Image: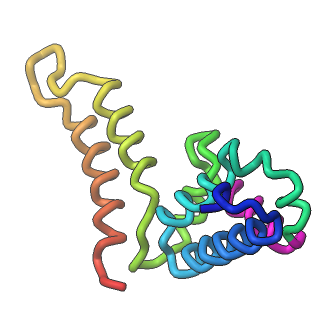
Amino acid sequence: EIVLNQSAKKRSMIIRTFISIAKHMLDIGNLNTMLEITAGLTLGPVNRLHKTWKKIPEKFSLELQRMTALMDGHSNFAAYRRHLSTLKPPCLPYFGMYLRDLTFIDDSSSHVLPDGSVNFTKMRKLSAVMHEMQHFQSSSF
């Protein structure tokens, strides 16, 4: 949508609208959609529209930077995890983080211990991740 417009003014209006929508998603706890919008706004083809970004008011640019920093995947999503711990249901978290956690736990150890018994430590870790996911599904929007 953004790169299809030839006018920098129209592109800047679209970007401002997307930033406003992303901010609203953050405010209502829809973090997955907020991440998708901010990720799209930081893609190379959009990011290279220098004339367009110059027309974006600083207030919007700072808000986009704040949301992008919140969803930074470095340090295992540390800022995002801190923010998520403050939210109460209903909330739509970023599921990619949970999939990453589940994959790491599953790949890091065997389901069965060397003595043939079930690896309950691994099962508890998997259960904790799934329980956190279910916690945010405990009430409807």
Residue 102 pos. (x, y %): 33, 40
Residue 46 pos. (x, y %): 71, 51
Residue with the most extreme top position: 114
* Secondary structure, magenta segment, majority class: helix
Counting the numbered discs, the total is 0
Quick one: 94 or 40, which is closer to the camera? 40
Quarter where residue 51 is shown: bottom right
Q: Is residue 73 above or below residue 84?
A: above
- Residue 77 in the magenta stretch? The answer is no
The range drawn in magenta is: 57-69
Q: Residue at x 28, y 65 (%)?
A: 134
Q: Is residue 121 above or below residue 3?
A: above
Q: Residue at x 80, y 51 (%)?
A: 49
Q: Is residue 1 left or right of residue 129?
A: right
Quarter where residue 110 is shown: top left
Q: Residue at x 41, y 69 (%)?
A: 92
Q: Is residue 63 left or right of residue 32?
A: right
Q: Is residue 72 left or right of residue 117?
A: right
Residue with the most extreme left position: 116
Identify the image quadrant of the C terminus: bottom left
Quick one: 2 or 43, which is closer to the camera? 2
Q: Is residue 49 left or right of residue 17?
A: right
Residue 118 pos. (x, y %): 12, 30
Q: Is residue 69 above or below residue 93?
A: above
Report the coloring of the rendering: rainbow
Q: Residue at x 82, y 70 (%)?
A: 9
- Residue 68 in the magenta stretch? The answer is yes
Residue with the most extreme front position: 6
Identify the image quadrant of the N terminus: bottom right
